[in-house]
Image: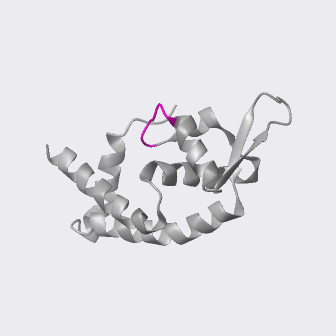
Amino acid sequence: MALMRAADAARREMVQALAPFEITLQQFNVLVILRHAGSRGLPTLEVAAQMVEKTPGITRLMNTLLRKRYIRRTRGEQDQRQQLCSLTKAGVRLIDEVLPEIHASQARIVRPVDRENLDRFIELLSSITPSQS
């Protein structure tokens, strides 16, 4: 139960940090994934595979970000059936604004863990997190 309470508290903290930007945690996750992909973009299913919290509604999530003009879709050069998603300039600006707030939020989440135990704490958390395939 302690793990579930901690996860819930962390989620609530990050949701609160994102509220002024009017994006959800899942939308933020997509934007970060696309930021790491750079200008080449990624297919929607690849974005879905990299998400922290898996969602069956990836198309709806992408459509919302498209309407907000944070992402764009383009056809793949080698496979015209494939749609690649990438950040727009507005999406890049948003991430640049949001990241300091998320980093501050994460610092508040781990504040109860003293500095000398923080690395071990993160290592332990990582050990129970399934690796991405």
Q: Residue furthest left?
A: 1
Query: What secondary structure characterizes most of the magenta part?
Result: loop
Q: Count up the numbered dots.
A: 0
- 66 or 92, nearer to the observer: 66
Residue at the (34%, 51%) spot, across then down: 123
Residue 54 painted magenta: yes
Q: Is residue 53 left or right of residue 41?
A: left
67 w.r.t. 77: above or below: below
Q: Position of residue 65 (x, y in %)?
A: 59, 50
Looking at the picture, does residue 126 appear above or below residue 116?
above
Q: Is residue 53 magenta?
A: yes
Nearest the eye: 107 or 21 = 21
User: What's the image's color scheme?
Assistant: one colour
Q: Give above or below for 40 relative to 115.
A: above
The image quarter containing residue 49 is top right
Q: Is residue 57 above or below residue 102?
A: above
Where residue 111 sits in the image (x, y, percent)?
A: 26, 69
Taking the spot 34% from the left edge, 54% from the top edge, the residue there is: 122
Q: Position of residue 32 (x, y in %)?
A: 56, 54
Q: Nearer the viewer, residue 115 or 100?
A: 100
Q: Quadrant of residue 60?
A: top right
Figure quadrant of the N terminus: top left
Q: Which residues are magenta?
A: 52-57
Farthest right residue?
A: 77
Instruction: List the single residue furthest toward the front.
Output: 67
Q: Residue at the spot x=71%, y=46% of the render?
A: 41
